[in-house]
């Protein structure tokens, strides 16, 4: 009877050795598979980058960064206005999303309610924020079109050369009339916003081409000779001259609704990255050691003092890293901007006022890539290279800030 257990005891080490060998082989196969998949992904990325670099390197020049898009001379096209447009849109996005996102994360993570109903509401908000992070950006574009561009038409529709919804500040309207000097005009202030034109039959006060307030004279060709004084000619119009309305807008011009403006585009992109910033900020706050909070509270600090002086400084590297990466996503978004601003790329410079339209880099690259001419395909590849450099720069800044602010 003692020989049987001895035989079993001798078989167990052999079986264990076989099983260990099988597990090691499976582990090696899985490890090799992971390495192969990673190498394939890197290879595809390298091939893509090489193809883009080969197609677009010939168009990389200073003119690409300074010139606007040109329909007549495609070879002279550039993305200068698009770079400016992307920067101002992302500025509005950052100024809106970062304070709101970080503040929401602090409230949800550090000031959790105790009442049952409020805890349920807290969990409901948390669940929806997590769901919103996975919503396609085109949906946010449609939301921005409804909320920011038209504001449900609650403030009226935007009209060409007319009152733009509810105009808040920064605009003056004039009637423009031709003088006796060819190409020279004078302006008469609009007294009635509902009157779209004026017929001048008597002298009135207005503004000349230099911006000075002058007396606008009226010349009746059938009753008086034509004036000969050059100064007087510049402020004299024919009797019965008709003037249409023009608007002079300052850089701080604002209205409701925002219309197809870069402010509406920036606010829409803020909606896109807001859930990401909230989630990243919450994770950074969770990573703070609970002992630090307890120590601050034990020393008599209030909840807000502990959050402001202990938790936020400790979580700031993670928050900044996530915020910069989210901004990198925003600067590369095309779908929401296409919905809000449209696909037009005919822009020779940056925005002139807060309600002006802009062109962004992704929209311009999308426009170039859809054209059949080879020169535009090369420009699209060069534009992709510029965007990659911008994104790599943002990622490098995120890594630098994370290492710089990391507690030692």
Image (cartoon, rainbow, N blue to C red):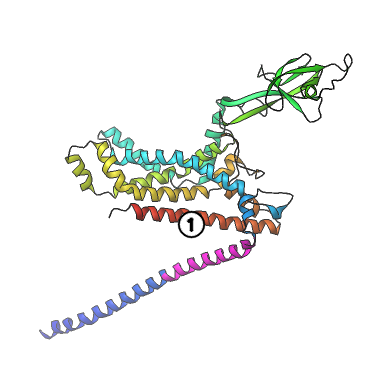
Q: Main secondary structure of the magenta part?
A: helix
Question: How many numbered badges does the structure rendering display?
Answer: 1
> 318 above or below 186?
below
Please give the name of the residue rendered at 62% of the width and 57% of the height, measured from the top-left corner: 61
Whether residue 115 sits left or right of residue 276 in the image: it is: left
Q: Position of residue 265 (x, y in %)?
A: 54, 40
**Is 162 or 350 nearer to us in this picture?**
350
Q: Is residue 256 visible?
A: no
Q: Is 49 included in the stretch rendered in magenta?
A: yes
Q: Position of residue 4 (x, y in %)?
A: 14, 83
Which quarter of the figure has residue 154?
top right
Which quarter of the figure has residue 260?
top right
Q: Position of residue 111 (x, y in %)?
A: 28, 37
The residue to which callout 1 is attached is: 392
Which quarter of the figure has residue 240?
top right
Whether residue 363 sits left or right of residue 220 in the image: it is: left
Q: Position of residue 208 (x, y in %)?
A: 71, 24
Q: Is residue 3 visible?
A: yes
**Which type of secondary structure does the marked residue at label 1 adopt?**
helix
**Extreme-left residue of the structure:** 2
Please give the name of the residue rendered at 57% of the width and 48% of the height, measured from the top-left corner: 83
The region drawn magenta spans: 35-58
**Is 347 or 67 nearer to us in this picture?**
67
Whether residue 158 sits left or right of residue 300 in the image: it is: right
Q: Quadrant of the C terminus?
A: bottom left
**Extreme-bottom residue of the structure:** 3
**Is 57 or 162 nearer to us in this picture?**
57
Please give the name of the residue rendered at 17% of the width and 84% of the height, measured from the top-left corner: 7
Please give the name of the residue rendered at 55% of the width and 43% of the height, measured from the top-left corner: 336
Q: Quadrant of the N terminus?
A: bottom left
């Amino acid at each position: 009877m003692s020989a049987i257990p001895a035989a079993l005891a001798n078989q167990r080490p052999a079986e264990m050795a076989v099983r260990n060998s099988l597990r090691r082989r499976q582990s090696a196969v899985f490890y090799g598979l992971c390495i192969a998949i990673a190498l394939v992904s890197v290879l595809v990325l390298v091939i893509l980058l090489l193809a883009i670099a080969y197609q677009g390197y010939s168009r990389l020049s200073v003119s690409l960064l300074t010139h606007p898009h040109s329909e007549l001379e495609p070879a002279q096209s550039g993305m200068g206005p698009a770079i400016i447009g992307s920067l101002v849109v992302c500025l509005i996005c950052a100024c809106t999303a970062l304070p709101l996102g970080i503040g929401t994360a602090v409230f949800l993570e550090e000031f959790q309610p105790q009442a049952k109903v409020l805890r349920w509401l807290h969990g409901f908000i948390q669940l929806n924020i997590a769901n919103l992070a996975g919503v396609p950006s085109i949906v946010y574009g449609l939301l921005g079109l409804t909320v920011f561009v038209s504001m449900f038409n609650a403030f009226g529709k935007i009209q060409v050369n007319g009152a733009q919804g509810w105009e808040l500040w920064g605009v003056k309207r004039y009637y423009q009339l031709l003088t006796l000097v060819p190409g020279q005009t004078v302006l008469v202030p609009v007294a009635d916003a509902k009157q779209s034109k004026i017929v001048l039959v008597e002298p009135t006060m207005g503004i000349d081409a230099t911006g000075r307030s002058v007396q606008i004279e009226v010349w009746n060709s059938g009753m008086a000779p034509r004036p000969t004084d050059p100064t007087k000619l510049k402020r004299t119009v024919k009797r019965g001259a008709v003037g249409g309305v023009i608007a002079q807008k300052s850089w701080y011009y604002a209205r409701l609704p925002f219309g197809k403006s870069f402010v509406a585009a920036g606010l829409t992109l803020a909606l896109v990255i807001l859930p990401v910033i909230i989630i990243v900020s919450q994770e950074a706050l969770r990573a703070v050691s609970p002992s630090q909070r307890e120590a601050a509270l034990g020393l008599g600090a209030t909840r807000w003092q502990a959050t402001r002086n202990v938790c936020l400084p400790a979580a700031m590297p993670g928050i900044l890293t996530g915020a910069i990466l989210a901004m990198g996503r925003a600067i590369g978004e095309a779908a929401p901007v296409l919905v809000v601003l449209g696909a037009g790329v005919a822009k020779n410079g940056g925005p002139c006022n807060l309600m002006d339209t802009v062109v962004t880099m992704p929209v311009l690259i999308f426009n170039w890539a859809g054209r059949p001419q080879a020169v535009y395909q090369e420009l699209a590849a060069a534009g992709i290279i510029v965007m990659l450099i911008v994104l790599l720069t943002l990622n490098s800044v995120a890594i630098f800030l994370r290492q710089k602010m990391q507690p030692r």
